[in-house]
Amino acid sequence: MKKGLLLLVTLILVGCNNGQTSFFTTNKDSSHKDQRQEIEQIVKDDQHIKRVTALLTDNAAIVGIEVKPFSKWKKRQYEKEWQKEIEKALPQKDVLVSTDLKIMIETDKLAKKQMGEKELDKKIKELKELSEEET
Amino acid sequence: MDAKQYDHLQQSLSPKPSILKNCLKAFLVGGIICTIGQLITFFYITYFNFTEKTAGNPTVATIIFLTMLLTGFGVYKKIGQFAGAGSAVPVTGFGNSVISAAIEHKTEGFVLGVGGNIFKLAGSVIVFGVTAAFVVALVKLILVTMGVANW
C-alpha cells in the first residue's frame, strides 16, 4: 500500500516535469519576420504569460497564449488588452488573440506542420469561428 | 420534564457527529468527482471541436450519464453514504436525485409513475435555480443600466 502510494506520487511528480518547451513558437516559413518580432516584443516581458504560439500569414494572424495559473482569474481582461496591442502592431491583418486551451493546442499543432499560406489561412479562419462559438 | 430539560437530555444521549471527519470525506470525494469532470473537459477540448467556453455542456451531460449508470448499479448509494454532501453538491447529486426517483416509482407505470415522479426530488433544485438566476439577471440588468458593469 505504502509502496504503491510512493510510486503514484513519484509518477505524478515525474509527469509534471516533462515538456520544457520554448516561450515563443511560430510557424516555420521565413516571411513576416518583423511582425513576428513585434509580437514577441509585446508578450516578452509580460509577467502573466507562460507560453505563446503565433501563426502568421499575409492576411491573418492567430496568437495562442498560455496564461500563468494565478493570472487565470483575470485572463479575459488580459486577453482583451493583448488583442488591442497586437492589432495595433499589425493593422493590416485580421488578428485573433486567445487564451483558450483549445486555440493553444490547435496553434501548437499547426506550428509543427508544414503547410501552404492558403491552407493556413483556412485553418485560422476555422479557429476564429470556433473561438466565437458560445454554446 | 420541561422542553429545556428534554433538549439537554436528548443532546447528551445522541452520538456526536464527527464534523471534521465528515467534512474531510466530503472534500475528498467532491474533489475527486470534480477532477474527473475536469479530465472529461480536457478530453473534449483535445479530441473534439470544443473550446474552454463550450466544453462545459458535454461534460455535464457525460457526468450525469455516468451517475445514471452508477445509480442504477447501486454504487452511488454507497458513495453517498460515505461522502455525504461531497457527492450531493456536484451535478452528480442532481443526476442521482432524478434517476433514483425514476427507479423508485418504476413499478407504478411509465407515465404516472416514472413521468410523474422523476423530478420529485430534483424539482426544487430547478425551481430555486431558475428563481435565483432570474434575481441575479435582474441585479445585473440594473448594474448594466447604471453603467457600473457590462454584459
Image: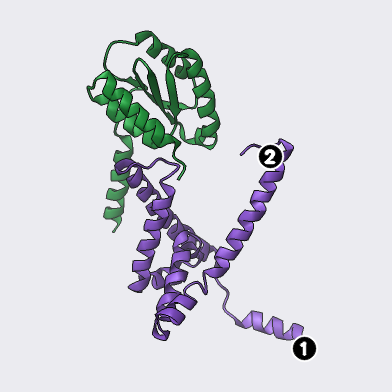
Chain colours: A green, B purple
Which image quarter: residue A60? top left
Q: Is residue A112 above or below residue A130?
A: above
* Image quarter hosting the C terminus of chain A: top left
Q: CA distance from mark 2 to mark 1?
A: 56 Å
Mark 2 or 1, nearer chain start: 1
**For the point 50% across and 35% down, which residue is it?**
A72
Chain identifier of the residue bearing label 2 in the image:
B
Residue B72, image quadrant: bottom left
Q: In x, y percent, where is residue B142?
A: 72, 44
What's the chain of the residue with tag 1?
A: B
Query: Residue sitting at 32 percent across and 32 percent down?
Result: A106
A112 displayed left or right of A41: left
The label nearer to you, 2 versus 1, is 2
Q: Is residue A20 visible?
A: no
In terms of depth relative to the viewer, which is nearer, B4 or B52? Answer: B52
Camera-nearest residue between B81 and B107? B107
SS class of the residue under badge 1? loop
Mark drawn on residue B88: none
Q: Position of residue B38 (x, y in %)?
A: 40, 49
Residue, far bottom: B1
Residue beneath disc 1: B2
Question: In this image, B82 relative to A13: left or right?
Answer: right
Q: Which mark is residue B144?
A: 2
- On the image, the x and y values in percent for residue B64 come to 40, 61
Relative to the observer, which residue lies in front, A69 or A85?
A: A85
Type of amino acid under label 2: Val
